[in-house]
Image (tube, rainbow, N blue to C red):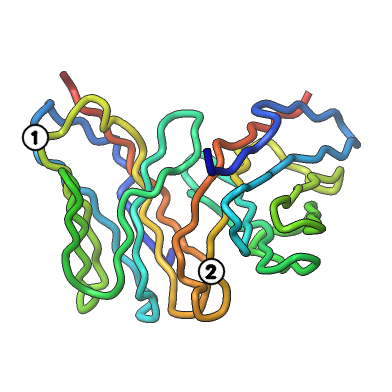
Amino acid sequence: DGGITQSPKYLFRKEGQNVTLSCEQNLNHDAMYWYRQDPGQGLRLIYYSQIVNDFQKGDIAEGYSVSREKKESFPLTVTSAQKNPTAFYLCASSAGTGRLSNQPQHFGDGTRLSIL
Amino acid sequence: QKEVEQDPGPLSVPEGAIVSLNCTYSNSAFQYFMWYRQYSRKGPELLMYTYSSGNKEDGRFTAQVDKSSKYISLFIRDSQPSDSATYLCAMSAFGNEKLTFGTGTRLTIIP
């Protein structure tokens, strides 16, 4: 089945620890995105990537890092600099860049990160 | 003021009723409009995707866009308990892949 796979489903972080959230897609989509979802705040964009080896900061990139070494993979690292990391993290992908940049985004089932 | 406003609810309606969900926005550059459904502990699922003004129907769902009023709606006919979820509106400007989301409306259909 084509889709977006996020792992793990639940993750716990200790103080001072970096953790990495995995996102893999087999939809052959060019663009990938990371969002953070908090109660009452909707989805906020952390980072996005339109092409391999290139990515841009979203609205709340501080304390996060990403890489895009392969088209199908876009891992997100939550660093110790992110002081309030407890949230539901969602990865998305879309087919379009450039002239096709308004293609709809499709989401994975998220990773819930909590602080120990 | 947020770019996209959405009533958070919660909204409870009896099974079989028509549901109306709405978003208003302030950015006149928005031309692409989406509705997503999100079940608890799951990712958002794309329901409707429309461009510019007008109506689009898909089964029991109808999306309506009024660009002159900067107002979009999602109607659900013959609502079912399985429609109980949070509904998110999202929109983007032409040539911009970044989506701006509403905060979501939590809907419960009462059997």
Judging from the image, what secondary structure is the residue with disc 2 in?
loop
Amino acid at circle 1: Ala
A107 vs A113, nearest the viewer:
A107
The disc numbered 1 marks a residue on which chain?
A: B
Label 1 crowd (10 A; few <14 / some 14-19 / many >=20)? some
> Residue at coordinates 65% horizontally, 37% vertically from top-left?
A6
Q: Which mark is residue B17?
A: 1
| Residue at the farthest top position | B111
Q: CA distance from mark 2 to mark 1?
A: 37 Å
Instruction: Say how many tags the image has.
Output: 2
> Residue at coordinates 20% horizontally, 79% vertically from top-left?
B68
Q: Position of residue A17 (x, y in %)?
A: 89, 35
Q: Which mark is residue B97?
A: none
> Residue at coordinates 11% horizontally, 41% vertically from top-left?
B77
Q: Position of residue B100 (x, y in %)?
A: 47, 63
Judging from the image, what secondary structure is the residue with disc 1 in?
loop
Q: Position of residue B37 (x, y in %)?
A: 36, 42
Amino acid at circle 2: Gly
Residue B3: quadrant of the picture: bottom left
* Left or right: residue A16 compared with residue B84: right
Query: Residue beneath label 2, please?
Result: A96
Residue A85: quadrant of the picture: top right
